[in-house]
Image (spheres, helix red, strand yellow):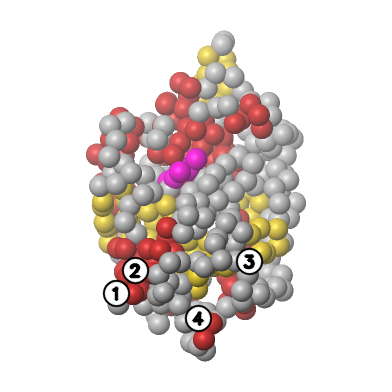
């Protein structure tokens, strides 16, 4: 994952523990004219464009996380043109960001809202609401999973935020009208949350989420080779390579340890005789986060998604780790899904990581969500 899981960590990418559901707090309605501070007064130059506004939620599920990350989080909402002048209700798609980049560039540079405007204007996609939550943390990202160290991101995203959005906006508040998508770490989260909560989401488009066959993932060795000294604080962590940061952030989910501040986790690597070695106990815990384990749990319950599109970029790079993902890990993962009887579609595009055309994902949502 020098580019993959590292890219995930940034992420500029591409994944649990059982947690009790916490009742969401009473949502605070947003002022209809509130705008994100990074948006201009006029949200788009095109008269047909929708608009983006900013909201905030205080999560009971994130309270008490050992990292001390904030429980009050911003989110952004794309509302299609005509929302303010109609009484219509809309399907909702939750868009999960990659690692450290909270919703940027999809929201802050207006790229995904613009990607929505054009196919809506051309009649290729119907009006939908898009919601962009914040899942960043001090380690670069929580992978949309849960542990005492990072907090309960599963409940925060799949329960609390959904409840607040449904009570604040004119949504169609049922699973048949609710989708989830994301790239890199967001793609990992899409697999995880869609398969864990098919009662919440009915359509999923995971994009370039690289969390399959972690046991044989070449990123482990790549990260180990770059690990020179164990970090002692956040400054040390920031100086590490992205692949190391990604592995450490995964360990925060898989191997939390309240007795080891400031990161409150067992490190995936240790220094022995001056050189880094993989900690095999932590390794076994981390590979338990593999998406295929979520898939096995999913097929053992009765409810099924109405559609899943696995959509990935090839990254157009020559990195040997990513080439192995292309040649071995992706095909093997798709074969395993077929063996498990999990219905899915697959799309591939020649593009840099998380910079692919989003129109196929939006069209898939349009075709499978209930309007």
Tag of residue 55: 3
277 within the magenta span: no
Residue, x 51% and y 37% (percent of image)? 246
Question: Please, what secondary structure does the residue beneath circle 1 have?
Answer: loop
Q: Is residue 275 above or below residue 371?
A: above
Q: Which residue is mark 4?
A: 83
Cα separation, mark 3 vs mark 2, equals 25 Å
Question: Disc 1, disc 2: CB below 8 Å?
Answer: yes
The answer to which of marks 3 and 2 sits earlier in the sequence is: 3
Query: How would you classify the magenta stretch by its main secondary structure?
Result: loop
Tag of residue 118: 2
Quarter holding residue 254: top right
Label 1 crowd bin: few (<14), some (14–19), many (20+), radius 10 Å:
few
Specify the segment rendered in magenta.
8-14
Question: Please, what secondary structure does the residue beneath circle 2 have?
Answer: helix
Label 2 crowd bin: few (<14), some (14–19), many (20+), radius 10 Å:
some
Q: Is residue 33 left or right of residue 171?
A: right
Cα separation, mark 4 vs mark 1, equals 18 Å
Residue, x 66% and y 51% (percent of image)? 151
Question: Disc 3, disc 4: CB below 8 Å?
Answer: no
Quarter holding residue 48: bottom left
The answer to which of marks 2 and 4 sits earlier in the sequence is: 4
Q: Is residue 70 left or right of residue 251?
A: right
């Amino acid at each position: 994952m020098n580019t993959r899981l590292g890219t995930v960590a940034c992420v500029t990418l591409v994944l649990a523990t059982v947690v009790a559901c916490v009742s969401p707090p009473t949502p605070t309605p947003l002022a209809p004219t509130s705008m994100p501070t990074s948006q201009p007064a006029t949200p788009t130059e095109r008269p047909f464009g929708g608009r983006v506004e900013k909201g905030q939620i205080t999560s009971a599920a994130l309270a008490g996380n050992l990292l001390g990350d904030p429980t009050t989080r911003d989110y952004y909402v794309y509302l299609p043109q005509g929302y303010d002048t109609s009484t219509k209700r809309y399907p909702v798609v939750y868009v999960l960001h990659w690692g450290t980049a909270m919703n940027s560039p999809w929201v802050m540079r207006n790229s995904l809202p613009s990607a929505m405007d054009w196919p809506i204007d051309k009649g290729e996609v119907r009006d939908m609401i898009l919601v962009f939550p914040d899942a960043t943390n001090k380690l670069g990202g929580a992978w949309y999973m849960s542990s005492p160290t990072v907090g309960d991101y599963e409940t925060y995203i799949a329960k609390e935020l959904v409840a607040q959005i449904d009570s604040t906006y004119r949504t169609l508040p049922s699973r048949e009208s609710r989708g989830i998508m994301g790239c890199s770490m967001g793609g990992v989260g899409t697999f995880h949350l869609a398969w864990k909560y098919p009662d919440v989401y009915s359509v999923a488009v995971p994009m370039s989420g690289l969390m399959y066959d972690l046991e044989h993932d070449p990123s482990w060795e790549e990260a180990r080779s770059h690990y020179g000294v164990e970090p002692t604080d956040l400054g040390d962590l920031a100086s590490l390579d992205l692949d190391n940061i990604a592995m450490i952030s995964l360990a925060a989910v898989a191997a939390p340890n309240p007795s080891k501040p400031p990161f409150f986790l067992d490190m995936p690597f240790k220094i022995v005789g001056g050189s880094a070695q993989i900690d095999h106990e932590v390794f076994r815990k981390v590979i338990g986060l593999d998406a295929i384990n979520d898939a096995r749990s999913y097929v053992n319950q009765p409810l099924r998604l109405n559609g899943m599109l696995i959509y990935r970029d090839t990254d157009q790079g020559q990195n040997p780790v990513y080439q192995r993902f292309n040649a071995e890990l992706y095909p093997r993962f798709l074969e395993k899904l077929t063996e498990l009887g999990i219905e899915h579609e697959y799309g591939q595009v020649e593009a840099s990581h998380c910079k692919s055309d989003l129109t196929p994902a939006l069209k898939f949502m349009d075709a499978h969500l209930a309007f």
